[in-house]
Image (cartoon, rainbow, N blue to C red):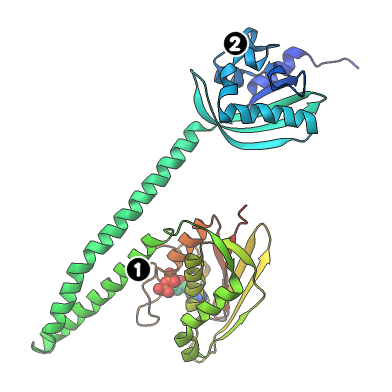
Amino acid sequence: MENLLSFEILEKTFNELSHGVGIFHIDDLNDLKSIRYVYMNKIILYEMRKNRDEVFGKRIIEVAPEAYQHEGGIKVIETYRDVAATGKDMDLGLVEYSNHMVAGIYYCSVHHIQDNYVYVMLKNVTELEQTKSELEQKNEELQQFASVVAHDLKSPVNSIYGLSQLIQNKLDERGNKILKTIIQSTQRMRIMIDDLLDYSRIGYQKEMTKVNCNNLLENVQEDLSIEINKSQAIIEVRDLPTIMAYITELRLLFQNLIANAIKFQQPGTTPKIEISAEEKGGWTFTVKDNGIGISDKHKDKIFNIFQRLHLESAFKGSGIGLAHCKKIVELHKGKIWFESIPDEGSSFYFNIPTTK
Ligand code: ADP
């Protein structure tokens, strides 16, 4: 059979790749300075700001001696040697690299080819990482903004509320009726402001800890004891895992879901709630109820802030509970969703990926 493969074809292919690819040879496994560039594709040559003649066949120490002078460089060089010695590929994750011409963050992995040949694959993610950190900063600013606004709104609303109460029953019938509505509205506004403040506070606790979810659920049930006793709710908690999580937030998450499961019940029915967990790509938790259910058409809406499907008179609440839940699950880098049959019940699911 005719051999169609040529060096030219291979090289063209390598140069078209979206990643930097470079082949190295370690002449002597006991000497880190004996590592040579065998081949570098266009992207790596660009990152090095060098041309092929300056690099191919040369030692790293001759071409880029600065690599031996900083942590990022040494880590990569040692990895070339280790991969050649063990034959095991290694994922280095994010590596910072700089010389007098380039400085950046690279996603980098090293793979064994054969004998003392290894290849590196890298992608420059400097811009991505910068955008990420800018986004995080903007997010933090936004949270602070929400918190300050909510905090500052509180005092005028409180004084309207207080003053309205002072003149309650001192007006004529029509005046009193209007005043009652004003008081109810300010009361609602106070609750919403408090909810907003809570929302902006989610994620302030920076450390994840080991959380025994069965113990956590006992505490949540204590906190909800008034609602549980009043509704005679039957709560079954299955065997739950111990996971790495933000404990205060996780507690609030379960509390909101269980409180909803108790609240959104058909009159005359005893709430039956089941809480379970299954291990698949982290842990997926389920809070299942036998309540009024949610129609499919509201699927995208209910996790939005202050979004409610019912009149305040039917079921009390401000509509921020599930927005809290979503924010908390996303803080853990997970997802939240539900399945429901109207008039039969709903199951809320959320997953918490395993943290290393
Ligand atoms: P709130 O409970 O204050 O109304 P949430 O954000 O917790 O706000 O919930 C938003 C809406 O989603 C609720 O008003 C309700 O219509 C619906 N909902 C939430 N949980 C359930 C549930 N377990 N069963 C039926 N409907 C629910």
Q: Percent from the top left, x then y, of residue 326?
A: 48, 62
Is 77 in front, or is 334?
Answer: 77
Give the residue drawn at x 52%, y 61%. Answer: 329
Give the residue drawn at x 68%, y 60%. Answer: 280
Q: Secondary structure at mark 1?
A: helix
Q: Quadrant of ligand 1?
A: bottom left
Q: Is residue 106 above or below residue 273?
A: above
Q: Which residue is mark 1?
A: 195
- Queried on whether the Cβ of the residue with tag 1 lies below 8 angstroms from ligand 1, the answer reads no
Q: Percent from the top left, x then y, of residue 338?
A: 56, 67
Residue lying at the far top in this picture: please name it.
Answer: 53
Q: Could one spot residue 99 in this view of the protein?
A: yes
Q: Identify the mark at residue 51; answer none if there is no mark.
A: 2
Q: Is residue 10 above or below residue 257?
A: above
Q: Amino acid at mark 1?
A: Asp
- State which quarter of the image contains the N terminus: top right
- Queried on whether the Cβ of the residue with tag 2 lies below 8 angstroms from ligand 1, the answer reads no
Please report whichever mark, 1 or 2, sits nearer to the chain's N-terminal start: 2
Q: Percent from the top left, x then y, of residue 21?
A: 66, 24
Categorize mark 2 by other alpha carbons within 10 Å: few (<14), some (14-19), many (20+): few
Q: Amino acid at mark 2?
A: Asn
Distance between the Cα atoms at labels 1 and 2?
Answer: 60 Å
Q: Quadrant of residue 272?
A: bottom right
